[in-house]
Image (cartoon, rainbow, N blue to C red):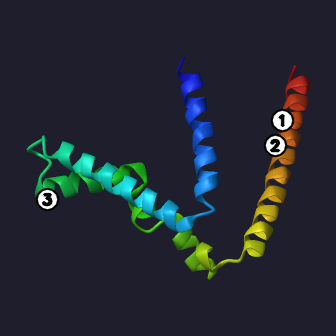
Amino acid sequence: MLKPIIRFFDHLEDKVRSRLSRRPILYTFIGGVAIVLFWKGVWETAELFPFLYGPYAIIISVVILLITGLFVSFFIGDRIILSGIKKEKKLVEKTEVEIEAEEDILEDIQSDVTRIEKEIHALRAKTKKRKK
């Protein structure tokens, strides 16, 4: 029952992202409005609970973000940290050719990883047969 609904929204998301990615300004505006509305809802819901005010709200949120590992990645982002360390260009500064080249490299890496996984599974199967 739940799988068809998830599949529907997954396909819908793919189509919407595909179309909106061709219009980055519109995409940004829609995304920005949606994010603000989301946080507005979170804010108004938090106001229903008296213990979620001021310093307590900060402490609770920082603890949750640290425990889940989202603190740094949310406020700075892993990609920004890694690109700064590697001295890479920001994604918006890259050309389409550079992005496609990176995609090709990632596809090659993925195929290598898949091949290595298959080899490991085959070696494990041989090892299990020898133990018997």
Left or right of 115 on screen, residue 85 = left
The x, y position of residue 11, in whole percent, is 63, 38
Crowdedness of circle 2 by 10 Å Cα count: few (<14), some, many (20+)? Answer: few
* Residue type, mark 2 in image: Glu
Residue at (38, 53) in percent of width and height: 34
Is disc 2 placed on a helix, strand or loop? helix
Q: Please state the horizontal and vertical placement of residue 88, each as a whole percent of the image.
A: 64, 79
Please tell me which residue is depicted at 91% across the width and 26% down the height of the picture: 130
x, y percentage for residue 67?
37, 50
Reading the image, the residue beneath label 2 is 117
Q: Quadrant of the C terminus?
A: top right
- Identify which residue is drawn at 58% across, 64% down: 23
Task: Please report the residue visible at 82 percent of the width from the left and 45 percent of the height from the top.
Answer: 114
Q: Label 1 to label 2, Cα distance in Å? A: 6 Å
Q: As shown in the figure, which amino acid type bears the numbered disc 3?
A: Pro
Q: Which SS class for mark 3?
A: helix
Q: Amino acid at mark 1?
A: His
* Residue under numbered circle 1: 121
* Circles 1 and 2: CB atoms closer than 8 Å: yes
- Work out whether residue 49 or residue 95 is closer to the camera in this orientation and state it: 95
SS at mark 1 in the image: helix
* Crowding near the residue tagged with mark 1, few <14, some 14–19, many ≥20 C-alpha atoms within 10 Å: few
Quick check: 14 left or right of 117?
left
Residue under label 3: 55
